[in-house]
Image (tube, helix red, strand yellow):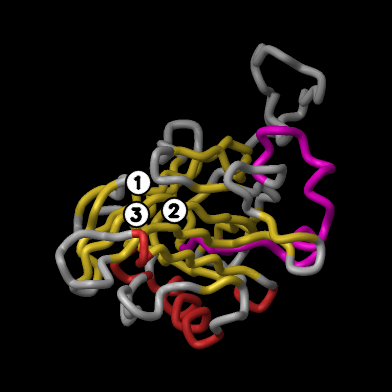
């Protein structure tokens, strides 16, 4: 059932055992997400930049996953992930055995795929139709990062409907390429997992959560640019 397996059958319904080349091993990426130094949970209040904030929904796309070894050789996967706080483990394809020093990946989607028709994907595919939506339409493409919630705008300590915000970052220019230096071993007796932490405190750094907290693509370019810069810095090796 693994597209990277030598005996892959697109019509298979049961995993009867995947066969790989001499040194290819299926890998996982574990993304552990944090806010206020605790595990991120949706539908919960957090204090963000001094403002009590209700996080209703957070999800984002990861693509272009690449492992780089000490010799500078890179090996990539064509997997697309839609990452959500409630899921930590994601299959990212198969990679050659070896010692790697860096993982590179995109937060967002490459331009060609970004402007393709999402109806071509099956239900349940990360690039297919989602509820709530992760797609604006053919001209703008996918929402790379979606954060919805309510902020405390009257400083009474409680998020309120008047403070509803939507941070929807997308468009080709806002695809972020992240590089994280970390030792990764791929092989028969290895864990074959890339462990990463996503720090949402970094994502929200410098954001005025009570007064300037909404962006849809490029309708608030200063905020979109700030979130782009923050996304570059929010990922690190999991301790």
Distance (Cα) linking label 3 and label 2: 7 Å
State the residue position of label 2. 58
Residue at left offset 57%, top offset 47%: 82
State the residue position of label 3. 55
Distance (Cα) linking label 1 and label 2: 7 Å
Are dots 3 and 2 in contact, CB under 8 Å? yes
Q: Which is in the foreground here, disc 3 or disc 2?
A: 3
Residue 226 or residue 209, whichever sits in front: 209
Instruction: Residue 150 in the image: state x and y as whole percent.
Output: 35, 60
Residue 38 or residue 139, whichever sits in front: 139
Question: For the N terminus, which image quadrant?
Answer: top right
Assess disc 3: are there few (<14), some (14-19) or many (≥20) residues with their C-alpha within 10 Å of its C-alpha: many
Residue at left offset 37%, top offset 70%: 203
Based on the picture, tell me whether residue 111 belongs to the magenta stretch: yes
Based on the picture, tell me whether residue 72 belongs to the magenta stretch: no
- Which callout, 1 or 2, points at the residue further toward the start of the chain? 1
Q: In the rendered view, does 53 fall on the left or right side of 178?
A: left
Name above or below for residue 129 compared with residue 65: above
- Report the span colored magenta: 102-126
Are dots 1 and 2 in contact, CB under 8 Å? yes
Instruction: Residue 81 in the image: state x and y as whole percent.
Output: 59, 47
Label 2: state its secondary structure: strand
Q: In the rendered view, does 190 fall on the left or right side of 108?
A: left
State the residue position of label 1. 42
Label 1: state its secondary structure: loop
């Amino acid at each position: 059932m693994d597209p990277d397996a030598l005996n892959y059958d697109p019509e298979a319904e049961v995993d009867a055992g995947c066969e790989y080349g001499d040194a290819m091993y299926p890998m996982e990426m574990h993304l552990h997400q944090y806010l206020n130094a605790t595990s991120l949970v949706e539908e919960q209040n957090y204090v963000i930049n001094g403002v009590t904030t209700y996080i209703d929904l957070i999800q984002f796309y990861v693509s272009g996953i690449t492992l780089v070894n000490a010799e500078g050789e890179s090996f990539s996967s064509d997997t697309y992930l839609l990452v959500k706080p409630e899921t930590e483990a994601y299959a990212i394809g198969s990679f050659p055995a070896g010692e790697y020093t860096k993982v590179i990946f995109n937060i967002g989607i490459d331009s060609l795929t970004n402007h393709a028709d999402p109806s071509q994907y099956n239900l349940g595919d990360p690039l297919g139709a989602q509820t709530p939506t992760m797609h604006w339409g053919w001209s703008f493409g996918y929402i790379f990062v979606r954060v919805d919630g309510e902020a405390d705008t009257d400083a009474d300590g409680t998020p309120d409907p008047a403070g509803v915000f939507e941070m929807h970052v997308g468009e080709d220019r806002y695809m972020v390429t992240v590089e994280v230096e970390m030792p990764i071993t791929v092989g028969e007796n290895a864990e074959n997992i890339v462990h990463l932490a996503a720090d949402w405190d970094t994502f929200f750094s410098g954001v005025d959560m009570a007064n300037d907290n909404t962006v849809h693509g490029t309708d608030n370019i200063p905020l979109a640019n700030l979130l782009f810069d923050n996304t570059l810095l929010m990922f690190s090796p999991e301790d």
